[in-house]
Amino acid sequence: MSEMPETFDLVGVGIGPSNLSLAALTSGEPGLSTVFVDHKDRFEWHPGLMLPDAQMQVHFLKDLVTPVDPTNPFSFLAFQVDTKRLYRLLVTGRSKVPRREFEQYCQWAVAGLDNLRFGVRAENVEWDGGSFVVHTSDGLLQARNIVVGTGLAPRLPHSMRGHDPERVFHTDQLLRRPRDFAGKRVAVVGGGQSGAEVVNYLLGGEERRPEQILWGTRRTNLLPLDDSPFVDELYLPDYSHHFYGLPEHEREEIVQRLRLTSDGISIPLLEDLYRRLYDLDLLEGRERSCRILLDHTLEDLEETAEGLVITWRPARGGEPVREAVDVVICATGYEHAMPDLLLGLKDRLAISDGLPVVRPDFSLQWDGPAEHRIFVQNAARREYGVADPNLSLLAWRSAVITNSLLGRRRYDTGSVSTALDWAPPGPQEADDAPAELALNTGR
Ligand SMILES: Cc1cc2nc3c(=O)[nH]c(=O)nc-3n(C[C@H](O)[C@H](O)[C@H](O)COP(=O)(O)OP(=O)(O)OC[C@H]3O[C@@H](n4cnc5c(N)ncnc54)[C@H](O)[C@@H]3O)c2cc1C
């Protein structure tokens, strides 16, 4: 940090891809003072699930900045050129790079930004009547605006809580400590991308291969991620505008209907997995290395002398399946919740169904002065739909926040070219949008 202002224009909490994108888009803004903090010692991207073969699910051009500003110095292409990899990347023919490379790209961007502080945990935020006060493990930070980008919390089913974390854990914890699966009976709960990645990893190496894997899901099959051409337009700014304007009661139903556009398993992974099972079962003659239980919901877990006995309830009647295993890995996703950090401001926020209400500029509706805003990143799935937790609109969301922060249209965040016609925003959006936002979002 060069100079420390008394009060920052923006203090960001969390340095994951979301706030890193915002840090990159705001870093060159003359006169704008920003600082972002993260409790980790260095940038890491979901280290518990950074499996060697894991691939990104979005194109590498959907990086921190390119979709809104390809001239920004923190683009993925700038990283490629700087590290002298671009020609080889082109030879690979990849459009989606390994997850490890996306992490390396983010670490490279971190090294080039001077407004990031690692090893600092934000504990609470208060409003002192003139500015926000962010209490951190390293003292107080004063801010005219804040942005919370603390990510989502791993979701562990109720029956899976309170057990030995060596034996029952969320995928988020998989690689955080050495684990020995060889010769064990392992249950994997959840039929989405993480579950598939974990099963593929467990089967992949002789030295870690369990004796038996029982992979259960309440889905009707191991369903693919739908990123086909027209469906992919759900991840354009125009669809997000459209979604925001829909009546609230329709939004959740639509999110559920479109779930497989973000939560399905990528086709190359399904192909890998299927071939692997073929080879293991038929060429190596290992009897059913992995049993796959569809249409079953995990119901209970008991610790017995035989091991961990898990009970799965069938979706369409019939007897529950009970099975003893040694380890249970929960690939049960992540959940949106009110960040603890904001509890100190809770009484001042508009809350609906337990969550703060997010306005079109990604700021929370609150009863404080309108020019001081509490922005949130990756916390508006209810308002913005399936694209919100995804990287596709990362740069766009940061651009919307930057425009709102600066009070002018620094970036063009309006309509882009689309093949599909989305209905114009409904009345709710028009009514709720403060005057300056109509300009900022190009509407
Ligand atoms: C394994 C995995 C793979 C994914 N792959 C893709 C993909 O390929 N494509 C895609 O579109 N989406 C993907 N996603 C979804 C999404 O893009 C990521 O979850 C992304 O990391 C979200 O970024 P974020 O910055 O909002 O949150 P996070 O990456 O979770 O970052 C939040 C940061 O906040 C910090 N923090 C939390 N609390 C505090 C505090 N009190 N004080 C200070 N710091 C704090 C944390 O240390 C963390 O660094 C993936 C998700 C997972 C889990």
Image (cartoon, grey):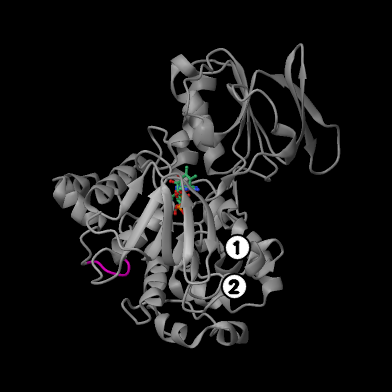
Instruction: Point out the tag, 1 or 2, that comes first from the N-terminus.
Output: 1
Range of residues picked out in magenta: 66-70
Q: Quadrant of residue 418?
A: bottom left
x and y, in percent, of residue 377 in the image: 48, 61
Residue 366 versus residue 105: which sits nearer the camera?
A: 366
What separation in Å lies between label 1 and label 2 (alpha carbons)?
Answer: 9 Å
Is most of the magenta stretch helix, strand or loop?
A: loop
The residue carrying mark 1 is 345
Q: Does the residue labelled 2 lie within 8 Å of ligand 1?
A: no
- At label 2, the amino acid type is Trp
The residue carrying mark 2 is 366
Q: Quadrant for the C terminus, please.
A: bottom left
Q: Farthest residue toward the right?
A: 318
Q: Is residue 393 visible?
A: no
Residue 36 versus residue 392: which sits nearer the camera?
A: 36
x and y, in percent, of residue 392 in the image: 42, 61
- At label 1, the amino acid type is Leu
* Label 1 element class: helix
Q: In this view, does 111 lie to the left or right of 252?
A: left
Magenta-drawn stretch contains 24: no
Q: Is residue 252 visible?
A: yes
Label 1 crowd (10 A; few <14 / some 14-19 / many >=20): some
Q: In this view, does 188 lie to the left or right of 84?
A: right
* Label 2 element class: loop
Asked whether disc 1 touches disc 2, contact meaning CB atoms under 8 Å apart, the reply is yes
Q: Quadrant for the N terminus, please.
A: bottom left
- What residue appears at the point 35 percent right and 58 percent down from the top-left corner? 35
